[in-house]
Image: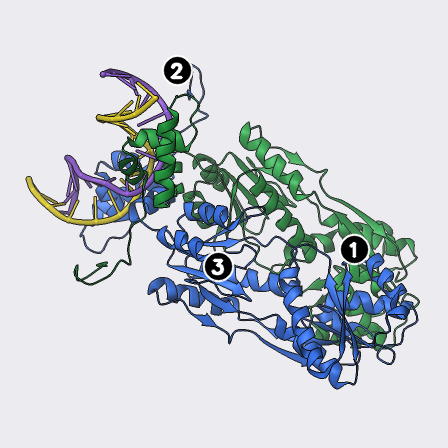
Chain colours: A blue, B green, C purple, D yellow
Amino acid sequence: MSHSSKPGAAAPAAPAVPTSADVARLAGVSRATVSYVLNNAESVRISEPTRRKVREAAEELGYVPHAAARSLRAGHTRIVLLPTPHIPIGPLYSRFFNELQWALRRLDYTVVQYGSLGLSGDQAARAWAELRPVAVISLGEIALSARNVGTLKRAGARAVITLGTGGVPGAHALVMDQSEVGLRAVGHLLEGGRRRIGVVVPEEEGLDLFSAPRLAGARRAAEAVGAHVEPLPMSYTEVSAERLAARWGGLGLDGVFAYNDEYAMLLMRALQDAGQRIPEDVAVIGADDLLIGRLLRPRLSTVQIELPTGDTLAALVDRVVREPVEAQERHDLMAARVLARESG
Amino acid sequence: MSHSSKPGAAAPAAPAVPTSADVARLAGVSRATVSYVLNNAESVRISEPTRRKVREAAEELGYVPHAAARSLRAGHTRIVLLPTPHIPIGPLYSRFFNELQWALRRLDYTVVQYGSLGLSGDQAARAWAELRPVAVISLGEIALSARNVGTLKRAGARAVITLGTGGVPGAHALVMDQSEVGLRAVGHLLEGGRRRIGVVVPEEEGLDLFSAPRLAGARRAAEAVGAHVEPLPMSYTEVSAERLAARWGGLGLDGVFAYNDEYAMLLMRALQDAGQRIPEDVAVIGADDLLIGRLLRPRLSTVQIELPTGDTLAALVDRVVREPVEAQERHDLMAARVLARESG
DNA sequence: TTGAAAGCGGTACCAT
DNA sequence: ATGGTACCGCTTTCAA
């Protein structure tokens, strides 16, 4: 722990970080004055010569304020905590997340990505609370309890926001009901006269957050007209798709909702290679309206999902942070609609 | 700013965050003892009954330590700062970044994503330094100077690591030379006898970080045999691809390196729709070895890029943080090789 | 206009 | 086995 064992040794290696005290000393003023000048304090008049002296001293030392010290004193942070998704979430949501980061940054928040793999709700909430974030935006991979929300709030979080299906007492919920996607997709297949519908369920871990409700929505649509729904486990690889295509004949399905466009393209190609005609033998529909869908032949029908923009969500966060308001559920932020193309 | 204007008003809204002092009071011990117990201090024996009392008090109050206070005292953080990429970087790099986050998290670092859009190197370095990160991993979108690296180091950063083409004095550089990709791709086209080579250059802002060196590599390969290289601006949209395909005849090109697989598939489809035969009329090669490449017909040739895994990089960061070592350049971390398929 | 000093919430040394 | 206390770096009264 000793920084320089031998004072004689020429070890300029640890030229300790300059503090505001160092600046003050060099400028020949007090730390208070340094603070005033560097923060452009309005409530206090500092003479121009003094300002200059301070600025020059800070510049010369390469002074950089210490964020932790500042927020300790201030009693609050501008940290927005974003639990890192466990999984390679699709391109659609990646983009959304990226946008969100930028939007928050523009509003002068500091985005902290916090991986919480293997943590329980309790553990995660505690770990997050240590950072005293002013807001937490949870994707819903960690199941937050009302108690957890309480922990965060007591630790100073002015906004706890969940994105996803459910809603936690005490937290704002942006309900993005994925079952809507399955409902619309299968609804479209049914309209086309299909009655034995396959629904691809990704085997990738973590994706069930999306796939489960999508499947549920599919079931709901099918039940309404007494159609059959067959869950089809598949992973995002060619061999998995081929394997599924190989046993296709025995399944007797005439339509398939393939979770999203990526799985859809994979399956569609495998089905074609296995001799199935699309859409004659089997109708295929994906979701997310990715560009690839339009490049495939036949062009892929899809369910287009309208997500809130990152700016929208960031603005909402900011609003809640500024003047906390009773936790609400908002359902108007995700819309899903079918884009019928050639595949079904 | 007043928290509860009227003391009489039933406003239990601000039940201040419990501190270790609160825990101490409730347990009837000193703050020191609380600290010892909660951190399982080895150097000090605390009786079992006391431990229990402290634990129970902490539990009852829902005490959560304050990370900022802790690191202020400790004099260092476990923050690794990751400047947020400006752009929707491709799937390959997204995955890499995601992996990196997880790996760092597992090593108990706190990952802070910091968007630095519109900041100069100086500004960015200062802003980052405020957080006193123990390490900074820069993608190279912000051009760091040696002085900036100095700022970060003086602010306590034990490792400053750049990923990308160049290297900054004082920082570790993981050189991932994108020109290698262009070199290999065009090299392959040349081997196939093509002599007039188009190189797609994405119009999307920010991507030039990748596309410029890829183009340079392409040029290098072509010059060696006196072949012609034609830069082809294009954006990631169908219309842009169609526009390019429409003027294809006048270009007289017999091969094209399409930046990556996404642009390649877009262009390939547009070319096919415009009546070009692939690979007879024009050979197409992409990069990144995305799954879609294998699903297209003809199957897309590509340059496969081997990136270090997130764990590798995280381990490297950790090693440098533990025992800082002279800044080095490592060139062995990216490998590129051609996967010849049907498109060229 | 400026300075002295009290904390913010922890940790760790030194006593007891 | 515990408690007292100085300090980390910064902001912000309050006095001068």
Residue closer to the observer: B147 or A120? A120
Q: Chain of mark 3?
A: A
Q: State if disc 1 and disc 2 touch (CB < 8 Å).
A: no
Q: Using the rendered view, name the quadrant where residue A31 is placed.
A: top left
Q: Nearer the viewer, mark 3 or mark 2?
A: 3
Pointer 2 residue: A7
Residue A299: percent from the left, percent from the top? Answer: 79, 77
Residues indicated by labels 3 and 2 sit on the same polypeptide chain: yes
- Mark 2 or 1: the one toward you: 1
Q: Which residue is mark 3?
A: A137
For mark 2, name the chain.
A
Helix, strand or loop for disc 2: loop
Numbered marks: total: 3
Q: Quadrant of residue B340?
A: bottom right
Q: Earlier in the sequence, mark 3 or mark 2?
A: 2
Determine whether, in the image, residue A83 is placed left or right of residue B271: left
Which x, y percent locates residue A226?
A: 74, 81
Say which residue appears at 22% left-offset and 62% top-offset.
B10
Residue B337 visible: yes
Question: In terms of image quadrants, where is residue A176?
Answer: bottom right
Tag on residue B289?
Answer: 1
B237 over A13 or under it: above or below: below
